[in-house]
Amino acid sequence: MLHATEMLGAETYDAQGNFVGRVKELFIEPGDQPNRISSVLLSRGRFRPLVARHDQLDSMTPGNLRLNTDEAHLDLYKANEAWLAVGKDLLDQQIIDTNGRKVVRVNDLDLNDARINGSTELRVTQVDVGLRGALSRLLKGVVPHSLIRQLQQKLPQRSIPWEFVNLIEADPLRRVKLRLTHDKLTQLHPADLADIIEDLSPAERDSIFASLDETSAAEALAEVDDRVKAQIIEQLPPDRAANIMEEMPPDEAADVMADLSPETSERVLEAMQQKEAHDVRSLLRFEDDTAGGMMNTECVVVGEDATRDEVLEYLRTHEVPVDQLDSVVLIDLDAKFIGVVPAARLILAASDAKMRVLKLDLPVSVPANAKEKNIFELFDRYNLRSLVVVDSDHRPIGVIAVDDVVSRLCEKR
């Protein structure tokens, strides 16, 4: 086992024993071999820096590297955006531990060396985020490598397997490397990803959102602090922000828009699809602490004479979000609200059962201007999972879900 800090600055000799230079940088090429040191940058005084490929490395020990070729066969260094620099891009940088669901700082990298086809390859096995790596950085060049290793043995090890690491790349020109591994981010629960995002700098947040697909970005954005939401959207191009807003439920998108500057909000709304923009604009008319400000306009509404099988067929053939399937809203021939059918009743009913037979006995609803205090009381009194919001003609215009109520109550604690 070697450490990246033991290789950086290592004296390097060619196959004839001639001094070539010191290791200035180690490169990884994520698009090729995500954990292999693909090349080594060598520097010697005023000479142009050279690059040794992974198949030109013969052996290495702390502070020393030997090549299996002559200096004449090494390439002159040319910058390559596909390379990830260990010293520049990793050491001391913040990374996401996708297994531990947190942001940590890199102190060192652990490397394994393996003999392959006449050369020795270095592979990154784990990232040191504890005191061992910090000690190595602190004492490097002050005391011998052997003594540093003895001291490290007395300290607890805190490391992350390389496969659980997701890179945060704030430089827009280098975001390609983040996109190569962003699939690990999308596997996190949106609430966990939101916690991580809140711990990052604005530039790093921008990088994360630039790497996520619209659905994942929308789910994560819904979970972050309101102040952070606005900061993120303000920095995104209007088209990108609009695509993310379109993936959010209208009530959540309206909450985000309400915290933006009027200019930014209007630019994003103009870039959104007409229907989604209309839904959001209609919600922005309501005060935040009213039923209209809390409701989601996306809800399943069917006629009272529809049968159970007809409703299920409708749900199968339309893209209905899962969080809208808690209950189905019923209307009469005049499109007035008459009740709801819980999903459990719908599933267990006979195929030809009419929806009016399946509805709950107590059709609870509130007008759009109802205050949140009254809404909380209704959820508590009737043990509701959702509450229908109606207009002045008693027609359903949205639904307030129990999770929205819980979120509001938590904010007020």
Image (cartoon, grey):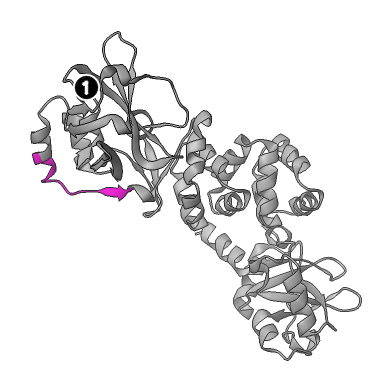
Residue 199: x percent and y percent? 43, 44
Queried whether the magenta region covers residue 153, the answer comes back as: yes
Q: Residue at x 19, y 33 (%)?
A: 60
Secondary element type, mark 1: loop
Compared with residue 309, is residue 93 higher up or lower down, i.e. above or below?
A: above
Q: Where's residue 158, x and y in %?
A: 24, 48
In this picture, which residue range is highlighted in magenta? 150-161
- Location of mark 1 (residue): 14
Picture layout, residue 136 above or below residue 409: above
Left or right: 274 as drawn, with respect to 173: right
| Number of marks present in the image shown | 1
**In this rendering, would 249 be left or right of 85?**
right
Q: Is residue 108 left or right of residue 295?
A: left
Whether residue 140 is visible: yes
Toward which corner of the image does residue 317 lie, by quadrant? Answer: bottom right
Relative height, residue 131 to residue 387 (above, below): above
